[in-house]
Image (cartoon, grey):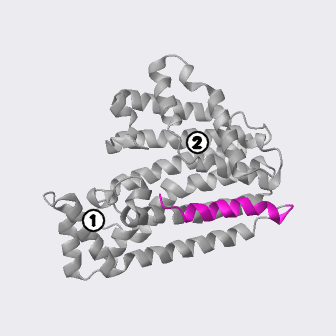
Amino acid sequence: MYTLEQYSALIEEQLKQLSIGSKTPAGLYQPIDYVMAAGGKRIRPVLALMACNLFSDDIEKALMPAIALELFHNFTLLHDDVMDNADLRRNRPTVHKRWNENTAILSGDAMMILAYRCICQAPPDVLPVLLDTFNRTSLEVCEGQQYDMDFEQRTDVSIDDYLKMIRLKTAVLLAASLKTGAISGGADVTSAESLYQFGISLGLTFQIQDDCLDVYANPDVFGKAIGGDILCGKKTYLLLTAFEKADSKTRSELSTLLNEQKIPANEKINRVKAIYDHLGVNNVARKAMDDYYQQAMLHFRNVAVPDDSRKTILENFAVSLLSREK
């Protein structure tokens, strides 16, 4: 078995070996290198290697598919930043701000192609299944992004609508990472599917936690100002729960606050947060997180591995994701 540090080191070393920043034309590849050098938690490739290691000591089999997943994830962030006109990503200027929108779009397209090149280096016996999983997941992530964009203009978004969206936009990629690693490691069909469902439930928990952190995190630990979702009127689990629980007067007040552009940012955040506190939406969200986490662990227990002690590091990693403060 490997340690978390060893998984991470393997991923970083393989990314370095791709030498993306040294390729030409520089205008295409340097922005990709800039994105990948920004770091991040590398959650998806780490999950792929951990899942492979449940069934095999030869995790090199899953390394290039894991890199493909990380490239794809960062490709989606790059294009998301263009669509959101975001200024910063990981405390650095976004690609379209440092270069321009055309560069961001084209470099993002190249990242997707590089991801396919990496996944096609998987062992031939598992490549068809991995490609099918990758293709289906990639399309689902795009569907989730479209739902998210649609929600910006809708006033009738339900919590079920939101859960469907975050399942597609966030959870399926975590699930596919686990399934990819499991298949690469020789898992049986039932165990691979159980890990996939474990990833879905974990992903839902992860995104609801993100919604909570944006409002309730310690700014000094969080690394950025809280309340960003409130200021842009983003549909989150907290906001939708508030609308569902509020009486008509409070619902009207909340809508007015979100739509009023002249209210100072800090005042808007504090007043919306006060409504959340009054309605207890943070407690509702925490309960939902716990429910999805329990579902995740039920699926995890159905994963059949040669030695149950192999599960410990993945289980601990899942716990660490859900106890994070940023």
Residue at 61 percent across and 34 percent down: it is 116
Magenta segment range?
A: 306-326
N-terminal label among 2 and 1:
2
Percent coordinates x, y for residue 238 in the rendering: 37, 70
Position of residue 272 relative to residue 134, above or below, is below
Q: Is residue 106 visible?
A: yes
Q: Is residue 190 visible?
A: no
Residue at 40 percent across and 68 percent down: it is 237
Percent coordinates x, y for residue 244 in the rendering: 33, 77
Q: Residue furthest bottom?
A: 247
Q: Residues within 10 Å of mark 2 (few under 14, many from 20)?
A: many
Residue 257, picture quadrant: bottom left
Q: Is residue 320 left or right of residue 103?
A: right
Task: Identify which residue, 322 or 52, lies in the foreground.
Answer: 322
Task: Identify which residue, 106 or 230, lies in the foreground.
Answer: 230
Q: Secondary structure at mark 1?
A: loop
Q: Residue furthest right?
A: 306
Tell me the kind of residue under disc 2: Glu
Tell me the kind of residue under disc 1: Thr
Whether residue 233 appears in magenta in the rendering, the answer is: no
Q: Secondary structure at mark 2?
A: helix
Residue under label 1, please give it: 155
Position of residue 259 relative to residue 242, above or below, is above
Q: Which mark, residue 70?
A: 2
Asked if the residues shown at circle 2 and circle 1 are in contact, with their CB atoms under 8 angstroms apart, the answer is no
Whether residue 325 appears in magenta in the rendering, the answer is: yes
Q: Is residue 307 left or right of residue 148?
A: right
Give the CA distance from mark 2 to mark 1.
34 Å
Residue 295, picture quadrant: bottom right
Percent coordinates x, y for residue 145 in the rendering: 42, 50
